[in-house]
Image (tube, coloured by chain):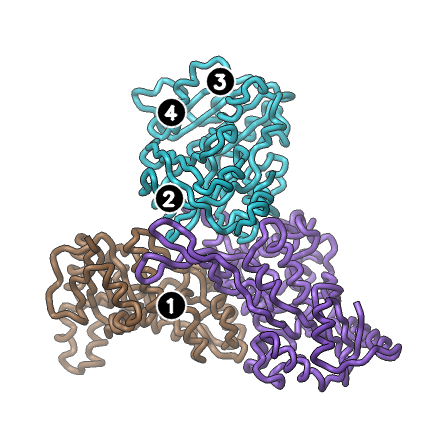
Chain colours: A brown, B cyan, C purple
Amino acid sequence: MAPRVVVIGLASDFGCQVQMTNIEDHLLDVLGLIDLTYWQLASSGHLPAEYDVAIVEGAVTTEAHVEALRRVRETAGAVIAVGACAITGGIPAIASAGELADRYGCVYGEGGAEVACGRIAPMPVTAVIDVDYRVPGCPLDTDEFLRVLSRALQGLSGRIPEEPLCAACKTRENICFHDRGELCLGLVTRTGCGAKCVSLGRACTGCRGIAADANLDAAYALLASRGIPAEEFTRRLSLYNTLEEGCDR
Amino acid sequence: MTASTTYRQLKANPYRPWPARITSIVDLTEKEKLIEMRLIDEAAREAFSFDAGQFVEVSLFGVGEAPISISSAPSKQGFIELCVRRAGDVTSALHQKQCGDIIGIRGPFGRGFPFPEMKGHDVLLVAGGLGIAPLKSLINHIHDDRHDFGNVTILYGAKNPSEILFRQQFDMWKHREDFELIMTVDQPDETWDDEVGLVTKLFDRIDVDPARTYGAICGPPVMYRYVIDEMRKKEMDADRIYVSFERRMKCGIGKCGHCGVGHQYACIDGPVFNYWEAMNLQEAI
Amino acid sequence: MFFRVMDKARIADLVRGLSTEYEVIGPVAKGERFTFSVIEDPADLRLDFDTTILPPKKFFFPPEERMMRFRVADNEVVDDEAFASPRVLFGLHPCDINALLLMDNVFLGEFEDPYYKAYRDATLLVGVSCSPRETCFCNAWDTDEVHWGFDIFLTDLGDRYFVSVRSVMGAELLDRHVETSPITAEDTAEFQAVVREFKRAFPAKLDTSQLPLLLDAKFDDPVWDELGERCLSCGACSMVCPTCYCFDVRDDLDPDQRSGERKRVWDSCQFSEFSAVAHGQTFRESRASRVKYRYYHKQWGYLSKFERVLCVGCGRCTHACLADISPREVVTALVEGSEAR
């Protein structure tokens, strides 16, 4: 029997699910291997009671999300967290800094507190439940998603690259942003994206999270010596990594 | 004939695994299986000869490769026996395989125990846990050439009785005159009537003639220093004490760099080193 | 070896001529840096380049390379052919040619690597002289000169090249595609003057006295901890190094999961996972131990096998390291003591 797969979206812009539809070339191959019983973005049905693999996108922003995730963890044999929101809290997690009600007030004006009712400080899926596989990035990389899904279907371990991006960037022979005195977050950001942004001429924004191997202390020190103050580095990191350890100086 | 000349003679790509058919699977413990296989290609099977202590790369396409020591004796040709602990993706997938399934094998690789040199001497073998696998190859090789050796002593330690590997064989050997075998466990159960404690404790029970004894040690990394200390206390020469190292390996042929230990590579310079060599390998022991 | 002189303007003839038979690769500008790339127009070839971001190793040992295609069902190799089309690599500095000779020891020695060999056999090498930059220290390892390992070597004499021809193939191609003339005593004298000036132009020569021994004797030197604190563990040094050859191997399944490819990708000893075994133990856990291993292997591990150090002093890692860790600094710290830095 083909593994039953569900795709669930929490707080996000559904960009990762849109990326999944962009697999076009291979979507039918992949669909042939699984029984896609629920896809929030593409189906109108309800989440079934039983399934084998849950793909979860988005950050946790309500108590209901927390409850839903606990049920997902109990039901699914394997959980795959996809996208920055689910893995580092991503952009939604910016709101976790400071008083939550004030944030809603900023956006919705008076009555913001009412909107905020039932909402909690945004956090990643990984802060609520253990996940077996992770596909980081904003949005996810379709090749990596296919590789991770393949590993999940084979029952292999969930490996995620833990090195900073610079090595991969070097293999693309990009001109280093730091050579021009510009800040690029690749020096501490988890690799695996093939340095796409830098290759297209944009500095890394850190969407894949902080690499486990990253040396943040050294990065802060060397950037300071190159005239980039700690506050600026922190500000840039906080776009996707507000909740990551060591990004708060 | 070394493995590299075998590859050259067969004009074989050293990265290309030879298909091998699994001919037998025995569950040893909850974590370990004894898997026996035969290379399907006749030329490769003929060319495949090895020393105790050498390893093969087991290849499962789609999953990857893992280096595993050969546990069968070099004196038994035609098949390869591996003792496989479920630890990573490859070994877990290997545990799912059935008799008759085809897997890939590359090798044999590395430098094993110096069997010809050991002949005519006493041998003291010390194993901890899964470390018994490569030593079993050496023990059985000695067994098949028993008249060429003096006293043969085997000290084997495991966490608990259920983790003792090859128990049937060893239980039989305990009563043999030509091998002295002492087993110990950290956590005994009610059935256990042998020693309790670390394998180093067993050194009190044995006599060693340092002038005519070779040592062979294999086990978890933490064990080496203590066992070597015991052997040195028995005044055994550093270059007659052999240890086998486990390191991360990808290629098995001295190229990918992962198994660097000090200034050497475990895959081609080892995995078996004598203690004098190992002492000169930084961060090895 | 025989020698010719060639008018500098003729280089376009040579490139155009070679292009009829080979893919011609050489240094071209990329922003303010250079890369070895396919030459579409001879005018793009920049033999006045300083250095390239990646060394020529990418053409012999690509950053990501298919080793074989396989079928999952019966665990069978479908295709492991190594294929390389004929090409000429133009503009290798002596360090880069020497680096290839060092790579050859690994890939063409025991257990010959069929993929590397196919690329190596299919590629002709045209070297070119250079002038040392402040990051260069090839003279410390005697890799500032190259005596073999090339087909043709061009030494810049200003308006013309002093052409050293090492191989039959090099001689034939030169003969076929470009007008050259025999050397005169003046040409040779000028060649010598250029070489003397080249040697003089280096920054102070790096003291490498007893380096392999010192790596052991000072294995616990605090310098490694200092370097470990600074190192980003980004692996950029390994990628841009012309002699780093470590790789990881991974299997990627096709979307239908029935077949796939076994690939190798460049790896670095600076990553913590590099030495991790299946049950989780990592043999070089600390950043300091990983930085140290890079030097330990290059200056002693490789030397113990092949009697050469695994560094050619090209300076690429010095440029690539955001933390400003350079072999010059590390070697000096070991040889002269930390105070000397």
Q: Do the residues labelled 1 and 2 touch (CB within 8 Å)?
A: no
Residue drawn 79% across the image and 76% down it: C4
Q: Earlier in the sequence, mark 4 or mark 2?
A: 2
Residue to which mark 2 is pinned: B102
Which amino acid is tagged 2? Ile
Q: Residues within 10 Å of mark 2 (few under 14, many from 20)?
A: many
Residue to which mark 1 is pinned: A248
Q: Are marks 4 and 2 in contact (CB under 8 Å)?
A: no
- Mark 4, chain letter? B
CA–CA distance between discs 1 and 2?
A: 53 Å
- Mark 1, chain letter? A
Residue to which mark 3 is pinned: B180
Residue sticking out furthest to the right? C185
- Mark 2, chain letter? B
- The reply, left or right, for residue B112 in relation to residue C125 is left
The quadrant where residue B94 appears: top left
Above-or-below relation of C218 to A111: above
Above-or-below relation of C213 to A91: above
The one nearer the camera, C43 or A167, is C43
Which amino acid is tagged 1? Asp
Name the mark nearer the viewer: 1 or 3: 3
Q: What element carries label 1?
A: loop
CA–CA distance between discs 3 and 4?
A: 15 Å
Q: Earlier in the sequence, mark 3 or mark 4?
A: 4
- The reply, left or right, for residue A72 in relation to residue C308 is left
Residue to which mark 4 is pinned: B167
Residue B153: x and y, percent? Answer: 51, 21
